[in-house]
Structure formats: structure tokens, C-alpha cells
């Protein structure tokens, strides 16, 4: 079941990345070319770590960095991504590709619909025996009735965490119309 969840996530990411590159081609062919190179590097790193269920935070951030670079080519000044990681958290263990689908959702559903763009904040901090990961955007947030649809990225992340950590994890979502979207994850702190 866990492998099935991972396999669902990879094509979903790849299709979204290819769509982003396709959108760049008529606007900025050189940026599209750089994005293809970035996607290749991201896929290489993903395949290298693909057999691993867990990686160090620093490795997860390296993968995330390649994804963010591709998105910056597409959105340019409309996208700001800020990453804050406590120094002692860099060697902590997290699920492989846990942050990328959350950042992808923040960009795609929160930032992209806004003409002015926006900011995505990624945080990894230690709170005693707990590792807290947060992905927050200042985008459009939930619909007017406060509801949102849990798609593939968020649903698979929730299922993977439950499968890997059982009751020793928590994923919470907070959102409001016009107030962005925040995903908080709590995991056991391990190095």
C-alpha cells in the first residue's frame, strides 16, 4: 500500500512539472530549457533516493530546492519561497519527498491564482522529541464557505505519514478565505 502511494505521487508530480514547463515554452524558451535541465536533475536525485523511504532533512531540502528553482523560472517575481530550518534539524529523518507536494499545492492552489503572486514559507524546527514541518502560503486560501478539497498530494502525504508513523504523527490543515493555507506536520524527531 505504501509503495502504491509513492507511485501515485511520482507521476502526479511529473505531469505537473511538465505542464509548468509547457507553459514556459511560448513565453520564455530559455527559461523552459533551464526548467527541463532542472527537472532532469530533480528526477536524477529523486531516483537516487527513490528506494529510501526516509531521508535527512538536508537531502529533502536539496530536492525541494530543484523544484522551487523550476517554479521560480515560471513565476519569476510573482513567487517568493522562504525556507527556515533549525541547524540541529538538518540531520533529522523525514519521509522522502514529503515537502515537495505540499509546496506544489501551495504554489498551484494558493499563489498561482493571484495576479500579484505570493509567498510560500517552509519551516523545519525541533520541539523536544517532535519534528515540526510547516508549509504555509499567503495565497487565496479556502473557498468562501471555508472548505477545501484534499487532492492527491495532501491525501497521499496524510496516508504515507499514517502508514509510516501510525499514531506518532499528526498532519493538520488551517485555511480561511483570502488568508492562505497552512499544513503542519509533527513527526518523531530522529537522526
Image (cartoon, rainbow, N blue to C red):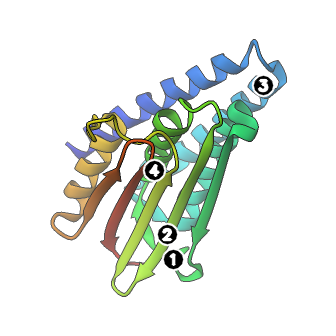
Q: Position of residue 176 (x, y in %)?
A: 36, 47
Cα separation, mark 2 vs mark 1, equals 7 Å
Quadrant in the rendering for residue 127:
bottom left
Q: Are marks 3 and 4 in contact (CB under 8 Å)?
A: no
Mark 4 lies on a secondary structure that is: loop
Other-residue count near label 4 (Cα within 10 Å), few / some / many at <14 / 14–19 / ≥20: many
Q: Which mark is residue 33?
A: 3
- N-terminal of the pair, mark 1 or mark 4, is 1
**In the rendered image, which residue does mark 1 sit on?**
89
Count of residue discs? 4
| Residue shown at the point (47%, 56%) measured from the top left | 135
Other-residue count near label 3 (Cα within 10 Å), few / some / many at <14 / 14–19 / ≥20: some
Image quarter hosting the N terminus = top left
Cα separation, mark 4 vs mark 2, equals 14 Å
Cα separation, mark 1 vs mark 4, equals 16 Å
Question: Looking at this rendering, what residue extends furthest in the bottom direction?
Answer: 128
| Residue shown at the point (44%, 47%) measured from the top left | 102
Residue 159 position (above or below residue 169): above
Cα separation, mark 2 vs mark 3, equals 32 Å
Quadrant in the rendering for residue 71:
top right
Image quarter hosting the C terminus = bottom left
Other-residue count near label 2 (Cα within 10 Å), few / some / many at <14 / 14–19 / ≥20: many
Q: Are marks 4 and 2 in contact (CB under 8 Å)?
A: no
**In the rendered image, which residue does mark 4 sit on?**
97
Disc nearest the viewer among 2 and 1: 2
- N-terminal of the pair, mark 2 or mark 3, is 3
**In the rendered image, which residue does mark 2 sit on?**
124
Question: Looking at this rendering, what residue extends furthest in the right direction?
Answer: 30
Q: Are marks 2 and 1 in contact (CB under 8 Å)?
A: yes
Question: Looking at this rendering, what residue extends furthest in the top direction?
Answer: 26
Residue 149 position (above or below residue 178): above
- N-terminal of the pair, mark 4 or mark 2, is 4
Amino acid at each position: 500500500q505504501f509503495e502504491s502511494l509513492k507511485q501515485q505521487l511520482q507521476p502526479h508530480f511529473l505531469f505537473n512539472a511538465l505542464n509548468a514547463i509547457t507553459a514556459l515554452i511560448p513565453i520564455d524558451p530559455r527559461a523552459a530549457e533551464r526548467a527541463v535541465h532542472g527537472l532532469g536533475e530533480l528526477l536524477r536525485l529523486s531516483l537516487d533516493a527513490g528506494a529510501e523511504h526516509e531521508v535527512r532533512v538536508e537531502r529533502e531540502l536539496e530536492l525541494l530546492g530543484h523544484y522551487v528553482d523550476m517554479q521560480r523560472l515560471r513565476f519569476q517575481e510573482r513567487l517568493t519561497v522562504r525556507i527556515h530550518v533549525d541547524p540541529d534539524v538538518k540531520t533529522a529523518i523525514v519521509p522522502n519527498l514529503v515537502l515537495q507536494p505540499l509546496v506544489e499545492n501551495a504554489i498551484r492552489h494558493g499563489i498561482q491564482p493571484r495576479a500579484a503572486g505570493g509567498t510560500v514559507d517552509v519551516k523545519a524546527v525541533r520541539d523536544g522529541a517532535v519534528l515540526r514541518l510547516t508549509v504555509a502560503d499567503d495565497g487565496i486560501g479556502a473557498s468562501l464557505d471555508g472548505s477545501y478539497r484534499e487532492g492527491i498530494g495532501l491525501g497521499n502525504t496524510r496516508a504515507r505519514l499514517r502508514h509510516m508513523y501510525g499514531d506518532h504523527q499528526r498532519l493538520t490543515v488551517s485555511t480561511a478565505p483570502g488568508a492562505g493555507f497552512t499544513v503542519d506536520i509533527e513527526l518523531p524527531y530522529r537522526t
